[in-house]
Amino acid sequence: MKVVIASDHGGLNLKKAVTEYLSEKKIEFTDLGPDSTDSVDYPDYAKPVAEKVAAGEYDKGILICGTGIGMSITANKTKGIRCALVHDTFSAKATRAHNDSNVLAMGERVIGPGLALEVVDTWLNTEFEGGRHERRVCKIEE
Ligand code: RB5
């Protein structure tokens, strides 16, 4: 599995925790930045992640800002992207199983790193169920 990840300044610390987790789990990833706490605009980081996942260059994307909201709104503007803003493991599992979400958004100012890593682990390891959910996901694309 290949993952592409980015944050803004508000999500930098949680992104570091997530990239350490990905390294520990030997999951291949690319970090598109930023790597400092200088203020940046989240759409500049959400869009490249969304485009690379939509183009099939990566299997999944992870976006982190202060709330996760700006990142998720931006990512969902790219056709083919189903970005889910998630801060609990129930939703992490459900959005993979039912929505086949391909980008995960989280907010560093909303969730602690312990739960965030459980969310990432659940989201990366839950398969799409297909079946009736496939029809619904197709309707999103239409
Ligand atoms: C940055 O201050 C903040 O607005 C951003 O990280 C995010 O929460 C936007 O949705």
Image: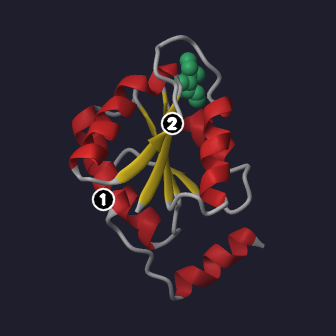
User: Label 2, on which residue?
Assistant: 6
Determine which of the numbered discs, if any, sits on residue 122 in the image. Answer: 1
Q: Which element is circle 2 on?
A: strand
How far is the residue under mark 1 from the one under mark 2?
A: 19 Å
- Which of the two residues, 49 or 76, is positioned nearer the viewer here? 49
Q: Position of residue 81 (x, y in %)?
A: 64, 58
Query: Residue at coordinates 45% horizontally, 53% vertically from top-left?
Result: 3
Which residue does the image show at 50% across and 19% down from the upper left? 9
Q: Amino acid at mark 1?
A: Thr
- Name the residue located 27 percent from the left edge and 37 percent from the top edge: 20
Q: Is residue 81 visible?
A: no
Q: Vertical placement of 106 versus 118: above or below?
A: above
User: Furthest residue to the right?
Assistant: 142
Up/down of 128 relative to 56, above or below: below
**Element carrying mark 1:** helix
Which corner quadrant of the figure contains ligand 1? top right
Nearest to N terminus: mark 1 or mark 2: 2
Q: Image quadrant for the C terminus?
A: bottom right
